[in-house]
Image: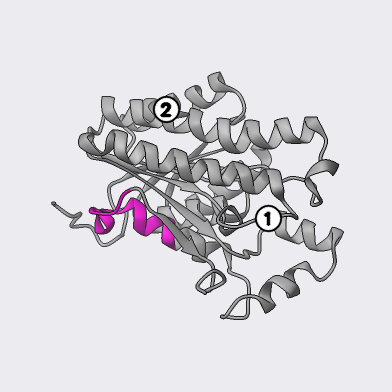
């Protein structure tokens, strides 16, 4: 395996990051650019995307954005096509875009909310992987994909049952894709964050005060992760330094599920 001779972990790579307007996705886009990647950001909110891209460019990075609705197959395919139009190829992709659900028991979730969370988290990841594999196959010939899962997918999750179910399905898609596309030198892994200080978590804590403190009490490191700590794990999995890692769901949870 030939590793990049550049100084950055992702030097010379062309990267796509979904859900890149805020939280883990925005942190990943900034990190990937610092590590030498040319980054295309995708999400539904143009104002957020533009702000992150301006920041990256202001620090000398190479970045652009495309507005994308992960629940719409045509929109997802256009986003991937845009990467190839701008940069000529796709090397790596971080499928981080996701939707949460109103916390509560399964029978209190509306059908519309269930359809939305599954449409974005499961169908959106499936759509993105299909388009990304096709682009990598047609251009770079080898590459890597990382999907964002959750430690909440690994056990019963009565507070977020539909969200957790979609993330467990993402784990299965990740494993299946790793086996399917490994012979083509396309690696597929997932990161499973624990408690992470994203806007989604802060909103949950506002609705249910004490949520973050409770989760931290169950975490051996005693704190929540900064979004960049999750991005660091994704960057490594996408890099050539993880060249023999595929089909893995990597917990980045401060030891929450170590027992």
Front residue of this view, candidates 88 and 114: 114
Q: Main secondary structure of the magenta part?
A: helix
Residue 104, given in percent of the width and then of the height, sits at 81, 51
Say which element carries label 1. loop
Q: Residue at x 53, y 41 (%)?
A: 169
Q: Left of 92 or right of it: where is 253? A: right
* Quadrant housing residue 226: bottom right
Q: Residue at x 35, y 30 (%)?
A: 133
Say which element carries label 2. helix
Q: Which residue is mark 1?
A: 157
Q: Left of 239 or right of it: where is 73? A: right
Image position of 164 with respect to 139: above or below: below
Q: Residue furthest top?
A: 74
Q: Residue at x 79, y 30 (%)?
A: 112
Front residue of this view, candidates 73 and 86: 73
Label 1 environment density (alpha carbons within 10 Å; few <14, some 14–19, many ≥20): some
Q: Left of 103 or right of it: where is 255? A: left
Residue 243 falls inside the magenta stretch: yes
Label 2 environment density (alpha carbons within 10 Å; few <14, some 14–19, many ≥20): some
Q: Which residue is mark 2?
A: 130
Query: Does any portion of residue 25 appear in the rendered image?
Result: yes
Q: Left of 6 or right of it: where is 13? A: right
Q: Which residues fall within the magenta stretch?
A: 233-246
């Amino acid at each position: 395996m030939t590793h990049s001779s550049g100084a950055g972990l992702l030097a010379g790579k062309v990267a796509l990051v979904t859900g890149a307007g805020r939280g883990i996705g925005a942190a990943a886009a900034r990190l990937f650019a610092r590590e030498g990647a040319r980054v295309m950001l995708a999400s539904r909110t143009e104002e957020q995307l533009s702000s992150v891209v301006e920041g990256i460019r202001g620090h000398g990075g190479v970045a652009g954005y495309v507005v994308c609705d992960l629940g719409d197959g045509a929109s997802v395919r256009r986003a991937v096509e845009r990467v190839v139009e701008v940069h000529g190829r796709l090397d790596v992709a971080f499928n981080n875009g996701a939707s949460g659900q109103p916390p509560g028991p399964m029978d209190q979730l509306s059908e519309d909310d269930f359809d939305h969370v599954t449409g974005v988290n499961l169908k959106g990841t499936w759509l993105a992987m299909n388009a990304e594999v096709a682009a990598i196959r047609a251009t770079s010939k080898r590459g890597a994909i990382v999907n964002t899962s959750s430690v909440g997918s690994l056990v019963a999750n009565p507070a977020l049952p539909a969200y957790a179910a979609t993330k467990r399905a993402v784990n299965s898609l990740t494993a299946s894709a790793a086996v399917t596309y490994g012979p083509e030198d396309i690696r597929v892994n997932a990161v499973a964050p624990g408690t992470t200080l994203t806007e989604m978590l802060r909103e949950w804590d506002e609705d249910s005060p004490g949520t973050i403190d409770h989760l931290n009490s169950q975490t051996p490191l005693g704190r929540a992760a900064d979004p960049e700590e999750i991005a660091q794990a994704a960057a490594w999995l996408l890099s050539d330094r993880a060249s023999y890692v595929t089909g893995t769901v990597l917990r980045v949870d401060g030891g929450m599920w170590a027992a």
